[in-house]
């Protein structure tokens, strides 16, 4: 076994390990990342100031912690279902109210904070406002000290309700400044057509079978499939499209997907042309081969190009625009 093949094996296992841990390629631009960070920063500065108007410094710091987590969701994932106004407002307010009920009606103990978090999860799921930072608010109520305990249910109104309203209103204003964002989702909606062969009822059935919480709006899911199907039906690769140094994908899902780099295209008058290639991504990675041009064209679905880091592949279209390779 030569050193090059060993290196390929190590890289392959490293990628599998990262994927198992949940690492995924990121298709967002640098601008989008900076916008998310700016929105979060400005929102927290505003929240810190508002909270200090109604609470002493120590109590305000406790509250700002869970609100900071909400700001990350609202400004970094404004299209997610966990980030929508009802999730933010209902999640924090109901969880805070449950936390206050725990400290007022149950004896103190090491288990009380855990009960507050677990109970808040049930309440939020049934109220359809699941918001992870809300459970942090329930824990803050239990562990936040005498100032929060003495405030009782007034703490739910000031500063919890006040803070979440500030986050939501600021998120609506801030995200409206950018055409790529919409918050909340109903403000702007892409027209959703019917994906070929797939109806909304099919998605409903599939989601029920999966029995898992999906952090994506239903209409966005339909739109995603519609765009993917439209892209899949566009023109494929022809013999004239093959160039040395070009990358081509078979467009298959899952483990069958692969990318080949064309090393050489040999044209032979009166005889079938040949293509020499190597497999640089996906199934058969590290291998190489030679085949007829006609055979390669049947295999290739479209031409692709890597991103700047070489981690993600994008489809190359006629108008030089790229869409993300699944």
Image (cartoon, rainbow, N blue to C red):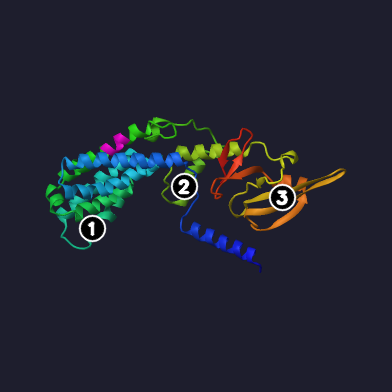
Mark 2 residue element = helix
What residue does disc 2 label?
207
Prevalent SS, magenta region: helix
Answer yes or no: do the residues labelled 3 and 1 have beta carbons within 8 Å?
A: no
Range of residues picked out in magenta: 166-170
User: Could you tell me residue 51's position as x and y percent?
Assistant: 20, 42
Question: Furthest-left residue in view?
Answer: 150
Q: CA distance from mark 3 to mark 1?
A: 62 Å
The image shows residue 192, relative to residue 6, as above or below, that is: above
Question: Furthest-bottom residue in view?
Answer: 1
What residue does disc 1 label?
113
* Residue 263 image label: 3
- Asked whether residue 127 appears in the rendered view, the answer is no
Using a 10 Å C-alpha cutoff, classify the residue at mark 3 as few (fewer than 14 neighbours), some (14 to 19) or many (20 or more).
some
Using a 10 Å C-alpha cutoff, classify the residue at mark 1 as few (fewer than 14 neighbours), some (14 to 19) or many (20 or more).
many
Q: Is residue 84 left or right of residue 276?
A: left
Q: CA distance from mark 1 to mark 2?
A: 32 Å
């Amino acid at each position: 076994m030569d050193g090059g093949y060993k290196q390929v094996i190590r890289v392959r296992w490293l990628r599998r390990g990262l994927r198992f841990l949940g690492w995924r390629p990121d298709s967002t631009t640098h601008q989008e990342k900076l916008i998310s960070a700016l929105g979060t920063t400005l929102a927290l500065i505003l929240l810190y100031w508002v909270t200090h108007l109604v609470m002493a410094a120590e109590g305000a710091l406790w509250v700002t912690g869970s609100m900071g987590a909400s700001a990350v969701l609202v400004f970094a994932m404004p299209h997610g279902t966990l980030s929508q106004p009802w999730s933010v407002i209902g999640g924090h307010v109901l969880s805070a109210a449950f936390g206050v009920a725990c400290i007022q009606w149950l004896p103190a103990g090491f288990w009380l904070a855990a009960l507050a978090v677990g109970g808040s999860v049930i309440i939020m799921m049934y109220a359809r406002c699941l918001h992870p930072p809300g459970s942090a608010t329930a824990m803050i109520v239990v562990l936040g000290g005498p100032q929060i305990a003495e405030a009782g249910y007034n703490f739910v109104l000031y500063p919890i309700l006040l803070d979440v309203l500030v986050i939501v209103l600021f998120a609506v204003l801030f995200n409206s400044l950018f055409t790529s964002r919409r918050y909340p989702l109903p403000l702007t909606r892409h027209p959703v057509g019917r994906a070929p062969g797939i109806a909304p009822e099919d998605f409903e059935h599939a989601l029920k079978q999966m029995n898992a919480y999906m952090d994506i709006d239903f209409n966005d899911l339909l739109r995603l499939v519609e765009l993917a199907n439209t892209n899949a039906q566009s023109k494929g690769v022809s013999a004239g499209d093959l160039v040395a140094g070009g990358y081509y994908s078979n467009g298959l899902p899952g483990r069958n997907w692969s990318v080949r780099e064309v090393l050489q295209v040999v044209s032979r008058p009166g005889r079938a042309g040949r293509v020499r290639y190597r497999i640089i991504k996906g199934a058969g990675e590290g291998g190489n081969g030679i085949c007829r041009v006609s055979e390669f064209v049947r295999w290739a679905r479209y031409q692709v190009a890597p991103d700047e880091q070489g981690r993600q592949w994008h489809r190359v279209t006629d108008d030089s625009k790229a869409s993300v390779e699944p």
